Image (cartoon, coloured by chain):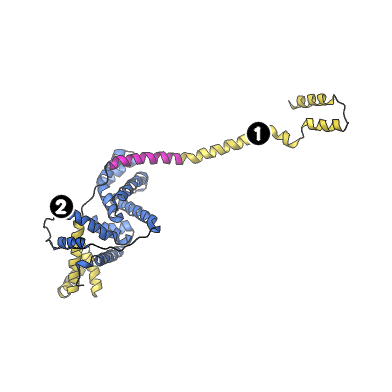
């Protein structure tokens, strides 16, 4: 975190190399967060570029009141929301049907014990299933689950990024997980 | 406390975002509630599923493409900054040219042409035929 502040400080003074180091350090997190929210690699790449472009032009407005990553995630989330707004006119379906094969694969993975090695092929197949489940959720749920489960941020960080109270973070995450459970209801038939 | 409230707590519990007192209360409840125990299993499953999600790489030459984009944006910003000034300058120059043109030609708008006046006088027989040359000589002489 201190390193980020230092790099931003240098960049503000005109050191472009410091900016390049910031990009190198955060590009994976930025790209994967966007991909998890948008569900498309091409679009994620394009938005990630726009995010860093905003960092470049708006670095002067970063006063260090929050950590650099919190500030960066806020730009990421706002950029995704802007992009999703553009899609508003298109018909979005949150209905998701998992094929029998996908259901079996997911059950199979969950049946393995924690710590067991899962082959690369199965892992790869699982990626699409997880993303499909994410894509089936409303945008707000996708964002909060991404920040928590993919990026592993704390409730405090999420509350700063989404500008909501800690209580809301708790409730929104609970609801998002309940919605995801409904989508994965084939895993829990007895309930 | 209702099961719904415990389920909200469970969600925070798997995230390790729960206070000591609440945790103790929750663990006590789990001993007697099979529904909430199943919920805890589900939440752990979700965590496991997401842990298996691999990080993807952005497309090739991310930094190079970004730096190119920044260059283009800089040019655009420069253009955006100077375009209004350029537009204003053009406007001022145009106004100035119009004023000059008006100043040079105002006589044409406010006074009839001397040839037209002389023609009228000749037609009406009010002056003699060589009058035209004399008047023009006087007019252009004084105009200079």
Residue B117 in view, yes or no: yes
> Which chain does the blue colour mark?
A
Residue at image point 76% right, 24% down: B141
Q: For the C terminus of chain A, which image quadrant?
A: bottom left
Picture quadrant of residue A164: bottom left
Q: Is residue B94 left or right of residue A14?
A: right
Residue B69, percent from left and from top = 35, 41
The answer to whether residue A167 is magenta is no
Pointer 1 chain: B
**Any mark on residue B132, and which?**
none
Give the residue at x 61% y 35%.
B96
Query: Which secondary structure, mark 1?
Result: helix
Q: Position of residue B106 (x, y in %)?
A: 71, 35
Q: Is residue B1 above or below residue A138?
A: below
Q: Are marks 2 and 1 in contact (CB under 8 Å)?
A: no
User: Which label number is shown at residue B101?
Assistant: 1
Q: Residues within 10 Å of mark 2 (few under 14, many from 20)?
A: few
- How far apart are labels 2 and 1 at the CA level? 81 Å
Q: Give SS at disc 2.
A: helix
Residue depth check, mark 2 versus mark 1: number of the one nearer the observer: 2
Q: What percent of the width, then of the height, locates residue B88?
A: 54, 39
- In the figure, what tint was chain B given? yellow
Residue in the foreground of this view, choosing between A1 and B108: B108
Q: Which residues are magenta?
A: B54-80
Q: Chain of mark 2?
A: A
Taking B90 as reference, is B46 left or right?
left
Q: How many marks?
A: 2
- Left/right placement of residue B114 relative to residue A152 reads right
Is residue B20 visible in the rendered image? The answer is no
* Up/down of A104 relative to A60, above or below: below
Label at residue A120: 2
């Amino acid at each position: 975190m201190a390193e980020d502040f230092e790099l931003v400080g240098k960049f503000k003074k005109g050191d472009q190399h410091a900016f390049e180091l910031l990009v190198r350090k955060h590009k994976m997190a930025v790209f994967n967060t966007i991909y998890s929210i948008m569900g498309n690699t091409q679009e994620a790449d394009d938005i990630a570029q726009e995010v860093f472009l905003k960092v470049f032009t708006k670095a002067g407005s970063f006063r260090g009141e929050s950590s650099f990553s919190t500030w960066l995630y806020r730009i990421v989330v706002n950029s995704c929301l802007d992009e999703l707004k553009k899609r508003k006119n298109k018909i979005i379906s949150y209905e998701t049907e998992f094929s029998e094969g996908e259901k079996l694969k997911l059950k199979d993975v969950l049946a393995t014990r924690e710590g067991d090695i899962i082959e690369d092929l199965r892992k790869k197949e699982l990626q699409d299933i997880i993303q499909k489940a994410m894509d089936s959720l409303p945008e707000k749920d996708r964002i909060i689950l991404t920040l928590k489960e993919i990026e592993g941020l704390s409730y405090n960080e999420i509350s700063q990024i989404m500008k909501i109270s800690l209580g809301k973070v708790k409730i929104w995450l609970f609801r998002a997980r309940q919605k995801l459970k409904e989508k994965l209801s084939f895993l829990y038939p007895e309930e | 406390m209702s099961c719904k409230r415990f389920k909200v707590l469970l969600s925070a519990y798997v995230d390790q975002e729960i206070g000591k007192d609440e945790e103790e209360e929750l663990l006590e409840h789990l001993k007697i509630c099979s529904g909430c125990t199943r919920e805890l299993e589900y939440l752990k499953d979700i965590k496991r599923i997401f842990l298996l999600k691999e990080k993807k790489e952005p497309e090739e030459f991310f930094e190079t493409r970004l730096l190119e984009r920044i260059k283009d944006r800089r040019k655009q910003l420069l253009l955006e900054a100077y375009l209004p000034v350029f537009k204003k300058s053009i406007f001022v120059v145009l106004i100035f040219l119009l004023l000059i043109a008006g100043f040079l030609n105002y006589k044409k708008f406010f006074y009839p042409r001397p040839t037209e006046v002389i023609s009228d006088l000749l037609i009406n027989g009010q002056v003699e035929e060589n009058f035209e040359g004399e008047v023009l000589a006087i007019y252009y002489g004084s105009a200079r």
